[in-house]
Each structure stands twice: as C-alpha cells, then as structure tokens.
Image (cartoon, helix red, strand yellow):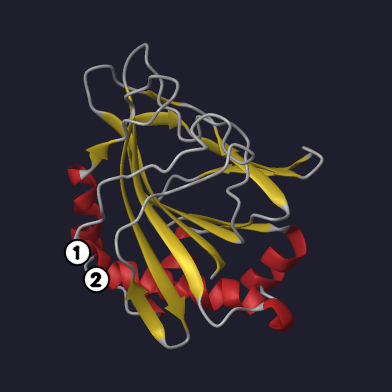
Amino acid sequence: MGDLTFALKSDGFVHVAADDMRRLLGEAGLTDWEGFAESWNDLGMDTYMADGGRYRRRRHAAFSVSAAGVRRKPHQPHYQSRDYNALNGGLARWFEPVLDRIAAHPAMLAILRTGFSIFDGCTDAATRPPSWHVEVHQFRIEARPGAHGLPTPEGMHRDGVDWVAVLLVRRENVASGETSIHDLTRRKLGSFTLTTPMEAALVDDGRVFHGVTAIEPVAADTPAYRDVLVATFRRE
C-alpha cells in the first residue's frame, strides 16, 4: 500500500496490476468475484448520450464512506457541469440503480473500503473530510463491426471530484481501450491498457486528465464489450 500511495501522491495517478489489486481487495474482504462480475449482464441502456450512441449500459449508486464504514445513500441523479463533461453535462441524469444485492456485495464493500484507505490516506489531514461522497458506476461499453464503443465519449477529461478509481471487471472480444493520463497542460504522462480483471487505474482528479480510446470487436460474430466499475470520491 505504501508504494502505491507514494506513486499516486507523486505522479497524480497509478496503474495497479491485477495481482496487487486482488491482494488489496482480499485484505478488505473480497469474496465471490464471479457473482459480482455477472451482474454486469443486467445493466440498463444509457439513454442520455448526446452523440446518439447506444453503446453504453450502466447502473449507478451513491454511498457515504468513512472510517466508520460504508452507508448507501438514497438513489439520486448523477450530475456533472459542462465544464467537466461538455458532451453530457449540465443536467441531472437518472440511471437505473445498482441492485441492492450488488451494493451490499462483499466485492463492492471491499472496493469501497480499499478506495477509502488509499484516497483518505493520500489526502492532507487539514482537508481530509470526516466522510466521502462516493458515486459508483457499473459500465458496459459495447462494440460492433463498424460501430466502435467509446469508454469516454467526452474525450480527455476530469470528473470534477477529488479521486477516481477505475477497476476492470471483464474484457470480451475487444481490441484497444487504452487509458491515457495527461497533466493540466495536456502533456501526456503515461498510458496503459486494462486487460485483466481487477487491474485498476487510480487518479487524482484535481491534477490530471484521463481518457480511454475506442474499443472495437476482434471477431465480428462474437459479442464484444468492456466492463468496468468506476468509483469517484469527493468531499461531502
């Protein structure tokens, strides 16, 4: 954990290998990963896409996370200003809620506890909140022949929060999906592709932009998709 937090504080982002994240999640109580991952087969279509795309499925939930534990908040809309999301920002977007059994699943709780441990530890004591507002998004990006899927249709962006965790759940029959990190002057700092379940990207949203390239199917006759869990942490 120490090397990871040092890199995050030093560079503004860190790419976490699957084995390392699996170990951290295991220490936080991870069980039944396959049951958790299977829930991505039951996501609703994102109907707010201003580009007219029908390639993104999602569910959404909000939590309060602190040293005292994890508490789910009443279902609420997801809002980003157009300063942070020029494509889909500026309105309250109501997505289907994360299923209760998934919100309370040991894998979800382990992810939230691990995110809290890392991000709270990387926050200066003077500005560290008593609890964090955490929004969780289950995303499935689908690709078809002649119709690429866009994991970040808004392009290189910040989310308007304090910290962002992106955890790969599954990749099926897709090429590309490269994550790039840029500083606030748009200078590229690094890039990598999440390929293995539980591989992750952790981002200091105040210091860097992040984006992911389009995905495309490898075999035309087989479903192609990229499943991720995104958790954003901001001060309550």
Q: Which residue is mark 1?
A: 100
Residue in the foreground of this view, choosing between 210 and 14 = 210
Q: Position of residue 67 (x, y in %)?
A: 47, 86
- The quadrant of the image that shows the N terminus is bottom right
State the residue at coordinates (52%, 45%): 80
Q: Position of residue 206 (x, y in %)?
A: 70, 56
**Camera-side residue of 59 and 29:** 59
Q: Is residue 137 left or right of residue 185?
A: left
Q: Nearer the viewer, residue 17 or 210?
A: 210
Question: Regarding mark 2 in the picture, which secondary structure is present there?
Answer: loop
Q: Relative to 188, say whether 4 is above or below.
A: below
Task: Label 1: state its secondary structure.
Answer: helix
Q: Are marks 1 and 2 in contact (CB under 8 Å)?
A: yes
Q: Position of residue 197 (x, y in %)?
A: 37, 53
Left or right: residue 108 versus residue 123 is: left
User: In the image, what residue occupies the spot 28% across and 16% down?
Assistant: 220
Q: Is residue 22 above or below residue 135?
A: below
Q: Indicate whether 178 appears above or below 103.
A: above
Going by the numbered disc 1, the residue's amino acid type is: Asp
Give the residue at x 22% y 62%.
102
Task: Say which amino acid is labelled 2.
Answer: Ala
